[in-house]
Image (cartoon, helix red, strand yellow):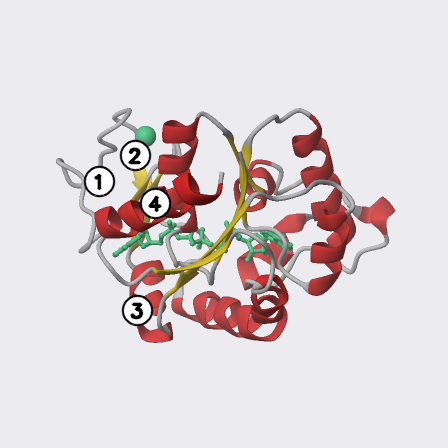
């Protein structure tokens, strides 16, 4: 199936996309991870304000569309089934995506703003394999060590309070209209993202089974 997962920063898109990729054997395409792996790539030829994605990401601003559209276009070309996470983030990207592929299921995770701030400022990620943890809600067996691979858990550069607040404002201004835009699309399902990770997964699994 071809899935899109939408929701604000910290809604659990990455956490649940990992489950979807495992269960449905699809590629997890995430612009956030792709950009983090290429933070220092030279984007000056795309006529951007800054020279690399890093400056945008650390502040919590959107990386210019041309850079992100190219990443998604390439990833979709080599994927059969996929779960797309972190894109589209504005209406221009949504229009671009419509020219690249059709979608079978569109999941939208709803979580309140106060909860998002707590989740993001407390998040820790494995430096080696990218698995998500939380200092309170989702602790590893051994403090600071990844359960999956033994890697070191670190805090993302954009998970400080100032960048988090800006990311949430950028979401409200640019990405919330994208969710409104998809609400009438076939296969759109709103999910209560404020439940436990297992409960959210149960709802997602049901929604995908019903539409894929
Ligand atoms: P990106 O990496 O996409 O970050 P994001 O959208 O801010 O999303 P997050 O990864 O922060 O959150 P998530 O929803 O995946 O939540 P998670 O599962 O980790 O983007 C980063 C930056 O890259 C952007 O700011 C921008 O600069 C750039 N960028 C990316 N895409 C772009 C695009 N298309 N255009 C332009 N620029 C782009 O969960 C969060 C925490 O909560 C974790 O600690 C987790 O353990 C915990 N948790 C998860 N589920 C639950 C639950 N049910 N209950 C309690 N805790 C939970
Ligand atoms: Zn790991």
Q: CA distance from mark 1 to mark 4?
A: 33 Å
Q: Quadrant of residue 173?
A: bottom right
Front residue of 85/135: it is: 85
Tell how many labels.
4
Could you tell which of marks 1 and 3 lies nearer the N-terminus?
3
Looking at the rendered image, the disc whose residue lies closer to the viewer, 1 or 3, is: 3
User: Gap between marks 3 and 4, in whole Å?
Assistant: 24 Å
Q: Nearer the viewer, mark 3 or mark 4?
A: 4
Residue extending farthest to the front is 210
Is residue 99 in view from this perspective? yes
Q: Which residue is mark 4?
A: 206
The disc label shown at residue 144, or none: 1
Q: Residues within 10 Å of mark 3 (few under 14, many from 20)?
A: few
Picture coordinates of residue 204, whole percent (x, y): 36, 47
Residue at mark 3: C-beta within 8 A of ligand 1:
yes
Q: CA distance from mark 2 to mark 4?
A: 34 Å
> Mark number for residue 115?
3
Label located before the other in sequence (2 or 4):
2
Q: Which mark is residue 152?
A: 2
Q: Are marks 3 and 4 in contact (CB under 8 Å)?
A: no
112 over 82 or under it: above or below: below
Secondary element at image label 3: helix
Say if disc 4 is inside 8 Å of ligand 1: no
How many other residues sit within 10 Å of disc 1, few (<14), some (14-19) or many (≥20)?
A: some
């Amino acid at each position: 199936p071809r899935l899109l997962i939408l929701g604000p920063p910290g809604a659990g898109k990455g956490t649940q996309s990992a489950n979807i990729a495992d269960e449905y054997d699809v590629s997890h395409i995430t612009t956030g991870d792709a950009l983090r792996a290429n933070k220092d790539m030279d984007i000056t030829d795309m006529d951007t304000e800054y020279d690399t994605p890093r400056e945008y990401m650390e502040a919590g601003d959107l990386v210019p569309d041309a850079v992100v559209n190219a990443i998604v276009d390439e990833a979709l070309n080599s994927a059969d089934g996929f779960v797309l996470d972190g894109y589209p983030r504005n209406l221009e990207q949504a229009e671009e995506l419509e020219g690249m592929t059709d979608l079978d299921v569109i999941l939208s995770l709803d979580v309140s703003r106060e909860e998002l701030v707590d989740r993001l400022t407390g998040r820790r990620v494995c430096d080696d394999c990218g698995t998500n943890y939380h200092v309170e809600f989702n602790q590893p067996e051994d403090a600071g060590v990844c359960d999956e691979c033994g890697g070191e858990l670190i805090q993302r550069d954009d998970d400080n309070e100032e960048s988090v607040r800006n990311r949430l404002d950028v979401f409200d201004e640019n990405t919330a209209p994208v969710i409104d835009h998809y609400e009438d699309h076939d296969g759109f399902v709103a999910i209560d993202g404020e439940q436990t990770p297992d409960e959210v997964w149960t709802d997602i699994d049901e929604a995908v089974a019903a539409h894929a």
